[in-house]
Amino acid sequence: MSKTSKIIFPVCVLLALAAAILWQIFLAQTVSYYLIAAAVMIAALLPFFISYEKSAPSARELSLMAVLIALAVVSRAVFFFVPSFKPIAAVVIAGAVCLGAERGYILGALSMFVSNFQYGQGVWTPFQMVALGTVGFLAGLLFQRVPAKRLQLSVFGFVIVFFFYGLLVDISSVLTMAADYSLQSILAIYLAGAQYSAIFAGATAIFLFLFGEEFIKKINRIITKYGILEGVSDER
């Protein structure tokens, strides 16, 4: 693909998404709020993937990213028998601490996308991708300034997963389950999902507290040993 094509393609996709949103808002007889939200979610994913592709990551970096994504996917799969109790966010946060905010976003979004081939793709997938991607992005930003110690990691993991991840992912439930978009209906759906968000947040905090520091040290050791991010100008 030529350099011009690499620019034209994402621009065309973004314009198509913008056209779909405008059509829904101003021209469609029945407005599909889910379609609008899904288009916005996809548009939120694209800039990170485009930016990462333009950074021309090395084969070693791609290999590390692939391994971390695989670990995140497996960490979700092995606890299939315990609903919502998954370490996937803990793996993403640890990876983001080492690789930075932008790569943390890619790590989170792709981990959720790939793992949903086992758990099921659906209307919730883009919301989960953006939510977990943003968890990775915020972890990469915060732990540039805050020491990645077990207490800080676990507190951050619980707060960001319960209050942010759960809030964003449950938008898909509101859009697909609510009979109307009244405050009472929306609150009922969020309250119904609060217990699942709390379990997921608790699992994230536990795994970060028990294993987060050591896992981060091992990732950093690999990055240093193989010079994976040498010459990379990043938010790290």
Image (cartoon, rainbow, N blue to C red):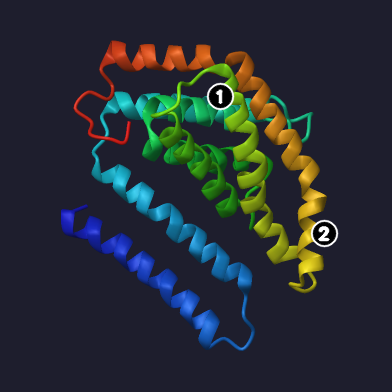
The residue under the point 52% across, 87% down is 26
Residue 6: image quadrant is bottom left
**Residue 84 visible, this orientation:** no
Amino acid marked by disc 1: Gln
Q: Nearer the viewer, residue 219 or 186?
A: 186
Is residue 78 shown left or right of residue 98?
right
Picture coordinates of residue 107, whole percent (x, y): 46, 36
The quarter in which the C terminus is drawn is top left
| Observer-nearest of 84 and 78 | 84
Give the Cα distance between marks 1 and 2. 32 Å
**Residue toward you, 61 or 191:** 191
- Per the rendering, the mark at residue 66 is none
Who comes first in sequence, dot 1 or dot 2?
Answer: 1
Tag 1, which secondary structure? helix
Q: What amino acid is found at the position of numbered circle 2 in the picture?
A: Ala
Badge 2 element: helix
Residue 125 visible in image: yes
Number of marks present in the image shown:
2
Specify whether 102 is left or right of 21. Answer: left
Measured from the top left, where is residue 171 in percent x and y?
Answer: 66, 58
- Mark 1 closeness class: few <14, some 14–19, many ≥20 residues within 10 Å: some
| Residue 186 against residue 213 in the figure, above or below | below
Percent of width and height locating residue 196: 77, 41
Q: Nearer the viewer, residue 96 or 119?
A: 96
What residue lies at 54% left-to-right and 47% top-to-bottom? 129
| 20 to 191, vertically: above or below | below
Residue at the image point whose x is 42% and y is 73% from the top: 18
Classify 69 as above or below 130.
above
Q: Residue at x 44, y 53 (%)?
A: 45
Residue located beneath label 2 in the image: 188
Which residue is under mark 1? Answer: 152
